[in-house]
Structures are given as C-alpha cells and as structure tokens.
Image (cartoon, coloured by chain):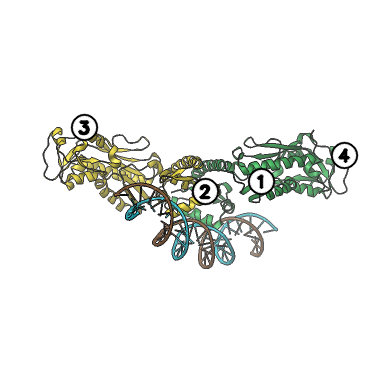
Chain colours: A green, B yellow, C brown, D cyan
Amino acid sequence: MLTHDDLALVLAIARTGRMKPAAEALQAHPATVYRRLEALEHRLGGKLFERIDGRQAPTGLAEEIVGEAKAIAERLDALNRAVAGRDARLTGPLIVTTTDTLQALVMPIAAAFGRLHPRLELRLDVSSAMADMRRNEAEIAIRPTRTPPETLIGSRLGGFDYAIYAGGAAAGQASLATLVAANGWIGLSGEIAQTPAARWLDVHVPQAARIASVNLMLGAALAARSGAYALLPTYLGDDPLFGLARMSPPVPELRSQIWLLTHPDLRYAAKVRAFMAFAGKALRRALREDPSRDEP
Amino acid sequence: MLTHDDLALVLAIARTGRMKPAAEALQAHPATVYRRLEALEHRLGGKLFERIDGRQAPTGLAEEIVGEAKAIAERLDALNRAVAGRDARLTGPLIVTTTDTLQALVMPIAAAFGRLHPRLELRLDVSSAMADMRRNEAEIAIRPTRTPPETLIGSRLGGFDYAIYAGGAAAGQASLATLVAANGWIGLSGEIAQTPAARWLDVHVPQAARIASVNLMLGAALAARSGAYALLPTYLGDDPLFGLARMSPPVPELRSQIWLLTHPDLRYAAKVRAFMAFAGKALRRALREDPSRDEP
DNA sequence: AGCATGCTTCGCATTCATGCGAATCGTAAT
DNA sequence: ATTACGATTCGCATGAATGCGAAGCATGCT
C-alpha cells in the first residue's frame, strides 16, 4: 500500500506544512505534489492533511505515518552518510555551508579548491541558520560559534571578538554609556535574533536607540557605513572593504571561535578530507594574517 | 545519494540473488532492474553486486546497504499493517493464502464472500509454503498446522487426521506392515518434504517402496487414484471427488488442526474482520459436516 | 468594496523511464 | 563439439508521470 517514496511525500508535507516548499524539498512541481497526495489519499481511503488557516495539518492517520517516516528518514540519512563516507572519488557535489559574514573569507579559498578539483561540484550554501547536517543538507560547515554541536567534529580555525563599529564621520572610542546614549543603532532580527550578540544588544541597547534591524550580519556592516552603530564580529568590522572604525574595545563575554566542521560519518570521505585539509590550512592562515585577530 | 526506492532495488536483488526474480518482486521488467542498478552503482561510484556462479553476490558496500534496507523494510511493513489496520473500507485487494489441499474447501466459501462484497478484490494465493505475513504478502492464512506461529492470531477451525488411502481396485483395511510391504507408494518432495507427514513416511515407508514423489498433496491424492498408496489428510482423502478408500485407521501422532490466521495489526481492518467472521463460520460448519471429521 | 497575494486545479505538451523483443553472450549439460 | 538455456545488453516505441502555464479559488489587506 505505502511505498518508499510515499513516505518521503508525507514527510515533506508534514515538515514544511505547505505544498510549495514541500515540492521544493522533493524537487518536484507543486502540481505533482498535489496529484501524488491525492492519489495516496485515495489509495489509503482517508485524508492525510487538512488545510487549517493556510497550513497542511496532518490527520491522525498522517501523524502515524509521519512518526515512522521520520524514524526511517533518519536511518536513511545515516546510511547515506555511511555510504558517502566510503566514497574515495573526488567527483560530484560537495556542499559547504557558511554564514554571510564569512563569505568573503571563504569564497576565494573555495574557488582555489574548486580549481584544484574541477570534477568536484563545489556548492557554497550561505545561510544564517546552520544547515541540518544530520539530514545531509551539507557536508561541511564553516561557522562562528562558541560551542559546536557535539554531533559534529572538526577543528577551530581561530578566535574572534565582537566590537562596536561605526562608519562615515564617526571615529575614535568612547564609553559604552556614551555610545548607547547616541541614537542610531542597528539591531538584529530574523534568524540571527537568537545569537549571543543579539542578546547582548537586547540587554545593553534599548529598543528606542535602534534605527533599523537587519536579518544578516553583513547588512549590519553595510548599514553602519552610513554612520550608525553596529555590533560586529571583528573579522567583519575590520575588513577595509567597509571603511568602519572600532568605537569600543572587544566585548569579552562575546568572544567566540570559527569552526570547520563535518559529520563524523563523513570523516573519511575523500572529498571531505580534501576540503577540510585544504580549507583548514588556508583559513587558519587567513585568520592569522587578519589584523583584527588577537590570539596569542 | 541513495533514495528510498534504491533501497527497495538493492534489497530485492539481495533477497532473490537473481535479477529476474528481483524484477518480479519489484513489479518491473528485468531490463529495468539492470538499468537501475547500473545507474545506482555509477552514482555511488562502486559495484554493488558481483556475479558469482549465477548469483548476484553483494559486495561489502551492498551488504551495508542491505542491512539497513532490511531494517527499514521491516518498519515500512509494520507501518503498512498499522495503516491497513485502520482501513474501514470493504474495497481493494484482500489476499488469502491457503494450501492446495484446502483449496476445494475454501474456494466456494471465498466465492460466496466475494459475491457479498463485489468491490473487494479477493485473491486466493495457493502455495505450500506459508506466505510471509510479516512482509505483508497476505492478509489471511488458512493453514493445516499443529502450532501456528505466535506472531499470528486467529482461531482453530477443526481437527483432522492423516490416513493411508488408495484408489482404483484397492479397498478394505490391512495392517501397516502389509501396506508397507506392498510396493507402490507416493512420496512427498519439494516444499512439503519437511512436513510431519513426510517425516512419518521417511520413518515407516522405505524409499524402495515409492513409485513417485509429488510436491503437492493434491498430486498425491490424484496419484492414489491409480492404485498407489498415499498418506493423505482425511478431509482430502475422504473427498468423494477422488474416489479413494481408507486403507488404515488415522495415524494418531499426525493429528493436526486447521487454522484461520491473520496478523495482529490487521485484526481491526474491516476487510479482515469481515472475511474472518464469514469464512470462520462457513469453514467451521463445512468441517463439522465433513464425515471424515472425528472430534467429539 | 477592491485589490493583491498565494493556494489549488486543470488541460496540454513533453520527456524520461519503462516495457518489449531481438541479438548477444556466457555457462552448463549432453 | 554441440546444443540449449538463461543472463545480459541494446534499440526502439510506448506511456505514465511530470512540468508548465493559465484559470479558478480562497484569504487577507488597504
């Protein structure tokens, strides 16, 4: 009755709650998803989802299926990693996920690596939220974080701080109190609203002092160019590209690390090994040469 | 890399060991199986099966996949039963498995049931080996056995014995020794070679006394018509259709039962409930009316 | 009320995987 | 050797599922 790919269908709809994103997850056209769901519901003799204010809400029957489908999908993902972990080829896709802020740093290194291995389809996935590596959405992550998830392994590339920056006419350092009193801050919203940096802002800079919020750190740096204050990672704020000036010393409690990470299952995959070695070395050097870096 | 239906592909080949049967299990053309396997091996970058004296032997990589695929298939089968168990419809396929010997008994009852529920696609699967009900190859089994598997539930329809029969000129009872001395026995081979009845023959009737072996009990009954001796279930041997005569009293140690069985998960499925109730009642009556039956 | 946005359905053209049968190959048996 | 049988590969035609875009619906917003 239920085949293997029916599970994928139900799971995609349940996970996204809407048909269009489910179609994207399945790499199919929305119309196809509608038709497949209709056919499946007809075969099972009952509805699987009901439309409740714009979302596809699973019925009892669907919930039962989704529960199993999740467990099965996890096993399949793990199997896929095990298989990929044995892959000795340097061909095919390799997905590296990183943040917008590290893009500038990573891009040239990735490009050099790509030139070295032309049969590799290197894909850079820039997103604020960490791609779900248990679901094999990426093989490698380059992330600023204090504590990487224990499910991943890798190495620290270097440390960095957060400091307050401003561009345009502003220059020189001042006390935090003075800076905060000055209206004209950039806040953080969206997916980066839950980061330690955003929480620090919540504590120290009142809402009233903010002129705008951005959902990308890079946006905060760009916004700072017009004179506003922004809390930025030093590797970003010190980038000459933006022409910003540090208005404060580093905030000690926000000190963090940049990590190069992968899933343990993928450790011995040729692609992953090659990239980790190459990018690890190059990024470490780049971060050491970076004047903003102040590790011993 | 590996999708859900790749699992089904690899599993089917591993289970059957040959491509043609695997294709049948997948309900596809052999050429399709070859092509799909080739495509998958290319994607994974390694061979999955090697041809060793006519069988497809899994490589290390394939073994890893097969292990997981089996576990996943079990979960999928269980889920399918759970879903089928909720099905309140009296439509679609209902597969009943039984032995060749019970065919004559079951067929008219199944036909009556089918007439009652014309939207049901009743399928009778006659085979000596019990269909694997954990793999959902059948919903209902009607089987002669002393001890049904504990994984199944159901009810006893009645008891029966085995006795020695002969047709044609032969008639009247004689001592076992006399019967055995008479050359001209029918042996049991193939899938029914491991039944208690076959083992009894092995002990009591020497190979030299056998003129033929059959792989269906029904074949033994038919063969007996030409004067040979055959050990048959009483409900079969006493059937006037064959015109056989009992040559011995029942063999006590071969006394057995006829069971009507299903998987616990399917207990509440409308189709299963309906059939179990209908066929249970009808078969019980048929077996009670059967003159060969000698229960209190 | 009117507009706009996103969801859903439908008809039609296309395409990719499949089925089919023939040809080829390998293996085992006589 | 010869034959026969099954496994495997190939080319071609078919068709079922898909993609696409338009049309038809809801729903919320101004």
Left or right: where B291 falls relative to A176: left
- Kindly report the distance in space between the C-alpha atoms of the residues bearing marks 3 and 4: 104 Å
Residue B116: horizontal and vertical position, in percent? Answer: 31, 52
Q: Position of residue A61 (x, y in %)?
A: 48, 45
Q: Quadrant of residue B127?
A: top left
Residue B6 in the figure: left or right of residue A170: left
Name the amino acid type tagged 1: Val
Q: Chain of mark 4?
A: A
Camera sees residue B267:
no
Residue found at x 24% / y 47%: B104
**CA gap, disc 1 to disc 2?**
25 Å
Q: Secondary structure at mark 2?
A: helix
Which tag, 2 or 3, sits closer to the chain's start?
2
Q: In the rendered image, which residue does mark 2 sit on?
A: B41
- Number of marks drawn: 4
Residue occupying image coordinates x 20% and y 35% = B206
Picture quadrant of residue A196 = top right
Q: Nearer the viewer's eye, disc 4 or disc 2?
A: 2
Q: Position of residue B126 (x, y in %)?
A: 30, 47
Give the mark toward the camera: 1 or 3: 1
Asked if badges 2 and 3 are on one and the same chain, I answer yes
Circle nearer the viewer, 3 or 4: 3
The label number, if any, that marks residue A71 in the structure image = none
Q: Give the image quarter of residue B173.
A: top left
Q: Secondary structure at mark 1?
A: strand
Mark pair 1, 4: CA separation = 39 Å
Can you identify the residue that label 4 sits on?
A174
For the residue marked with disc 4, what is the amino acid? Ala
